[in-house]
Image (cartoon, helix red, strand yellow):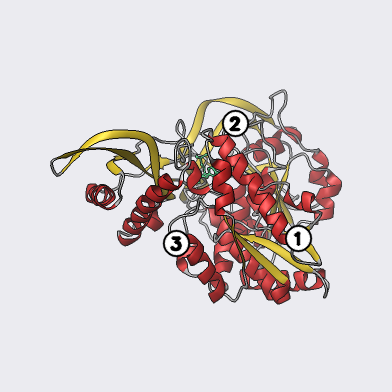
Amino acid sequence: KILVLDFGSQTTQLIARRIRELGVYSEIKPCFVSLEEIKGFNPSGIILSGGPSSVYDKDAPMISAEIFELGIPILGICYGLQLISYLLGGKVERSEKREFGPAYIKIIEENALFKGLKKGEKYKVWMSHSDKIEFLPEGFYVLAETENTPFAAVAHVEKPIYGVQFHPEVVHTEIGQDVLRNFVFEICGCTADWSMPSFIEKTVEDIKNLVKEDEKVICALSGGIDSTVTALLVHKAIGDRLIPIFVNNGVLRKNEPEEVLSLMKSLGLKVDYVDASSLFLERLKGVEDPEKKRKIIGETFIEVFEKEAKKFDNVVYLAQGTLYPDVIESVSFKGPSATIKSHHNVGGLPERMHLKLIEPLRELFKDEVRKIAELLGLPKHIIWRQPFPGPGLAIRIIGEVSEEKLDILREADAIVREEMLNSGWYYKVWQSFAVLLPVKTVGVMGDARTYEYVVAIRCVESQDAMTADWVKLPYDLLERLSNRIINEVKGVNRVVYDISSKPPATIEWE
Ligand code: XMP
């Protein structure tokens, strides 16, 4: 396995993902972990990530130079390379010529790192740095150069220490996967034994061993991929000693409860269904503030779930679909970031209920979960379902939530969904949905004046929801959406299209 030490780069997660794509397990740890912890992890190789700092910054993240004495192969990427140079006695400087974007490296020395690539040949890589190495530490030599960077790739003459100035983890670096493959297999001697079928087998076995004969596990189902895959893995291990609970919070989409229940049934899960919609809607009455709505929905969910779980005896575990990015986000090297919206709706549940946690997806990236979902036979529309927020339609009705408004939004949303699916756009975008605005505008229908609500359509593309851009949907699709919503949804006489990017707007309107 490969350890990636994170120095705060935007692309650190990609490094681990690329390594796993090669069939080798990889984990990310913050750069400040102790040498003991690194040794305890027992990696076959260590990758030092890039990062936004300069090695000369006052608070530049560092590591102990003893890491180079462990005899474990090391690859430094960008900041990682500069750190190697700096710590071992080379010199790093601010560069006159910053390099961002594509560059061509020329390989000038044959080396295991470039196995399969040709000496003298030029290859396209992706650069992103403003510091450069002035001279290398003793014992290092140059493997490749670019026009602006004489030290685009370097290696130590005898120790297994390597560095590249470019980013092999991004797709724009043509030879990126070759470099990582060579590092992992040729230099670190790893074998490719990380695969999703073996992950399923091992996870199921682990859960089987963990949960005793008389113990039960509960989990909350949302109908999304993470909670569904979690439930299926636990179910494979302990059968109906898993109690999946599905709570209807009153702000789900049209036909959603029925669809979730029938899917779960087809997957062999016996779901405990709780319709708490009237309780949720009662509590949302008169509430306009988005953060208050989120809080009420989150807290009511916990209350309902807790009460329901008490009906079952010998419940010892709570299974949750936490993914790897959530796990690393909490430890990684990151500056303070302000809370814009409180997205984590049900935190604190296991502590409150005195339950132990089972998180079978803790080590996985989303694309790996999708692979498992496929292997477990989940249908495409679940595997590639667009994200749907926990507070559901409540944060897509601007202002107070009411039955009347929910009915209007459900119909409009169903039309958006249907048209996006039929036109093939649904799976191409990150999210597409309708928002109900708290304004009425004047219209004319037949010969009569109307005074009705406005629906906004939001459709964005994004990689990770951190940034997003509005999608240039074809006019004829927009036309169909508008026509259908105005004609078919009672109470709406105007449709607008949201053309704001994130930032400065957010994806949801609340
Ligand atoms: P924003 O609106 O912050 O949304 O750009 C980013 C992503 O997060 C989803 N979102 C939520 N998900 N609970 C959730 O589970 C929430 O309160 C929440 N608010 C936003 C949003 O749909 C988008 O995918």
For marks 2 and 3 on the same chain, the one whose residue lies earlier in the sequence: 2
Q: List x then y, in percent, for residue 21.
A: 58, 61
Residue at the spot x=75%, y=73% of the render?
Answer: 205
Residue denoted by label 1: 310
Does residue 33 appear to the left or right of 16 in the view shown? right
The numbered dot on residue 255 is 3
- One can see residue 456 in this view: yes
Neighbour tally class for label 2: few under 14, some 14-19, many 20 plus, Cα within 10 Å: many
Say what secondary structure mark 3 lies in: loop
- Vertical placement of residue 159 versus 374, above or below: above
Which of discs 1 and 2 lies nearer the camera? The answer is 1
Quarter assignment of residue 212: bottom right
Does residue 134 appear to the left or right of 386 in the view shown? right
For marks 1 and 3 on the same chain, the one whose residue lies earlier in the sequence: 3
Residue denoted by label 2: 132
Q: CA distance from mark 1 to mark 2?
A: 61 Å
Q: List x then y, in percent, for residue 408.
A: 37, 48
> Which one is in front, 327 or 446?
446
Does residue 239 appear to the left or right of 405 in the view shown? right
> Which one is in front, 433 or 101?
433
Q: Amino acid at mark 2?
A: Lys
Residue at the spot x=77%, y=39% of the render?
Answer: 32
